[in-house]
């Protein structure tokens, strides 16, 4: 899961995502809020941000990609959304249960997680350079 987290952080850096929370409350992605109605935001350093907050911020950023409609935009959208879906799956299926001591994995389950993390990292490596 640490490898997947490094990949997630590289994606955040690649997309220049800022992890922000309204001061004094939990993260909320507000795409349709007007600037006047948005609460004051506090930027969270990436290394202290929760997975859920990072994934929400990534989703908001990917929705804001401004590329003209066409095959290039479709490929970008597919690439980034595929990564976000994978990271959400890692969080829910493997990371949270183990990190919060809800379960342990046997060798077969650990190998299954390893194969998925390896696939994520290979996919990331096609477009990103690690700077984490």
Image (cartoon, rainbow, N blue to C red):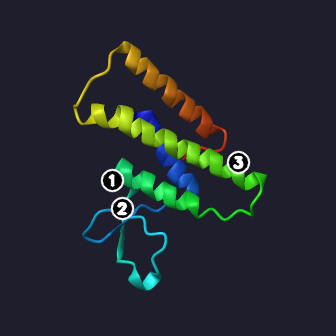
List the residue tagged with mark 3: 75
Q: Residues within 10 Å of mark 3 (few under 14, many from 20)?
A: few
Asked which quadrant contains residue 130, the reply is top right
At horizontal 66% and vertical 39% (from top left) the residue drawn is 126
Could you tell me residue 73's position as x and y percent? 71, 55
- Residue shown at 29% from the left, 33% from the top: 97
> Could you tell me which residue is drawn at 57 percent across and 48 percent down?
81
In this rendering, the answer to whether 8 lies above or below 116 is below
What mark, if any, has residue 48 been given in the picture? Answer: 1
Do the numbered discs 1 and 2 sit on residues whose CB atoms are within 8 Å?
yes
Identify the image quadrant of the N terminus.
top left
From the viewer's perspective, is 70 left or right of 53? right
- Mark 2 neighbour density, 10 Å: few (under 14) some (14–19) many (20 or more): some
Q: Nearer the viewer, residue 93 or 47?
A: 93
Which residue shows up at 34% across the image and 62% down it? Answer: 27
Q: CA distance from mark 1 to mark 2?
A: 7 Å
Residue assigned mark 2: 44
- In the image, residue 45 sits, relative to residue 127, either above or below, namely below
Q: CA distance from mark 3 to mark 2?
A: 30 Å
For mark 1, give the secondary structure.
helix
**Which comes before the other along the chain, label 3 or label 2?**
2
How many callouts does the rendering have?
Answer: 3
122 left or right of 92?
right
Q: Residue furthest bottom?
A: 36
Q: Are marks 1 and 3 in contact (CB under 8 Å)?
A: no
């Amino acid at each position: 899961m640490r490898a997947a987290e490094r990949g997630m952080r590289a994606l955040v850096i690649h997309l220049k995502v800022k992890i922000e929370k309204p001061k004094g409350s939990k993260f909320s992605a507000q795409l349709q809020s007007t600037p006047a109605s948005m609460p004051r935001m506090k930027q969270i350093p990436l290394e202290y941000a929760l997975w859920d907050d990072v994934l929400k911020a990534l989703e908001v950023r990917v929705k804001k990609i401004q590329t003209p409609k066409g095959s290039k935009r479709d490929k970008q959208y597919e690439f980034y959304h595929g990564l976000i879906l994978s990271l959400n799956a890692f969080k829910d299926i493997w990371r949270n249960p183990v990190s919060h001591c809800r379960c342990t994995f046997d060798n077969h389950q650990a190998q299954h997680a390893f194969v998925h993390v390896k696939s994520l990292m290979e996919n990331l490596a096609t477009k990103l350079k690690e700077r984490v």
